Image: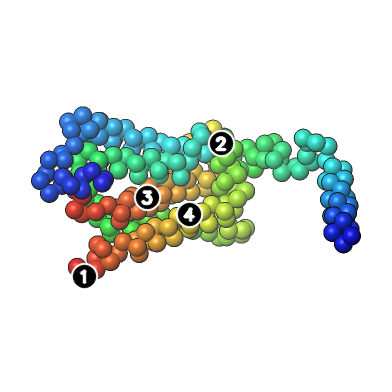
Amino acid sequence: MAKSKSKTASGENEPSIIVKSVARIMFPLAFTYGVYIFVHGHLTPGGGFQGGTIIASSIILIYLGFGSLNIPESLTTALESLAALCFIGLGCIGIFKGGNFLWNAVGLGEAGTLLSAGILGPIYVVIGVKVGTELTAIFNNMRRKDHEY
Amino acid sequence: MKRALSFLLLGLLISIFMVTVLNVNTFGEHDIGVGAHYLDHGLQEAGATNLVTNIVLDYRGYDTLGEVTVLFTATTGVAALFWRERHGKK
């Protein structure tokens, strides 16, 4: 970052073709891997926090390769708030079924399948979306406009 | 004299505590059943094959809700820090 400060004005600091190609190839793979991690959070190691972090880093990779990143602030805010509300709503299912908040009221299903463990899977999906958008929003806030090449 | 007496008292207290602690459990073992309960009944009670998910989301769901809230607060703090630079008057 400090190095690019001196060169941004002249525009010489374009990322090399290697960085661009790697970013173009790796972004869909990393994004899909992040989604896989949080969708399978209740079956395999990993979960919402880890998957969300992978998604956010894939978006940072796009920024490194192409220099500009036009994610509207309203989109990250809306997704983040929606995910938080979904978490609370999934927790409230337990109350409506006559138990405690966050009670796993839905049937557990067959262990090991994707649609098992009641509300745990959906909660991890929601956490993944929330963490991914939040870390993207942090990065979006911290980058400087005049550091873009 | 006073000093020696205080050291003596301190040593006595420490030895009482040490003897008490050593008598609670044999060294290297414990009789707290919660970990064994998670291992034995986690799959039946919570239903996820990933035991960490069982603990994090089922047994300690409130903790995870708080964690997500902490992350939300961190994002809000960063946005508040950089708000003036991005939106304020130049």
Q: Given the image, on which type of amino acid does mark 4 rest? A: Val
Q: Which residue is mark 1?
A: B89
Specify which label sits upstream in the sequence, 1 or 4: 4
Residue mark closest to the camera, 2 vs 4: 4
Q: Given the image, on which type of amino acid does mark 1 rest? A: Lys
Rounded to the nearest angstrom, the CA distance separating label 1 from label 3 is 26 Å
Q: Which residue is mark 4?
A: B68
* Residue A122 appears in the rendering: no
Given the image, what chain letter belongs to the residue carrying mark 1?
A: B
Circles 1 and 3: CB distance less than 8 Å?
no
Question: Residue drawn at (71%, 44%), measured in percent from left and top?
Answer: B34
Towards the viewer: A64 or B8: B8
Q: Quadrant of residue A99?
A: bottom right
Quadrant (top left/top right/bottom left/bottom right) for the C terminus of chain A = top left
Question: Residue drawn at (62%, 48%), measured in percent from left and top?
Answer: B59
Q: Which residue is mark 2?
A: B50
Q: Given the image, on which type of amino acid does mark 2 rest? A: Asn
Say left or right for A50 vs B8: left
x and y percentages locating residue A66 in the rendered image: 19, 41
Residue mark closest to the camera, 2 vs 1: 1
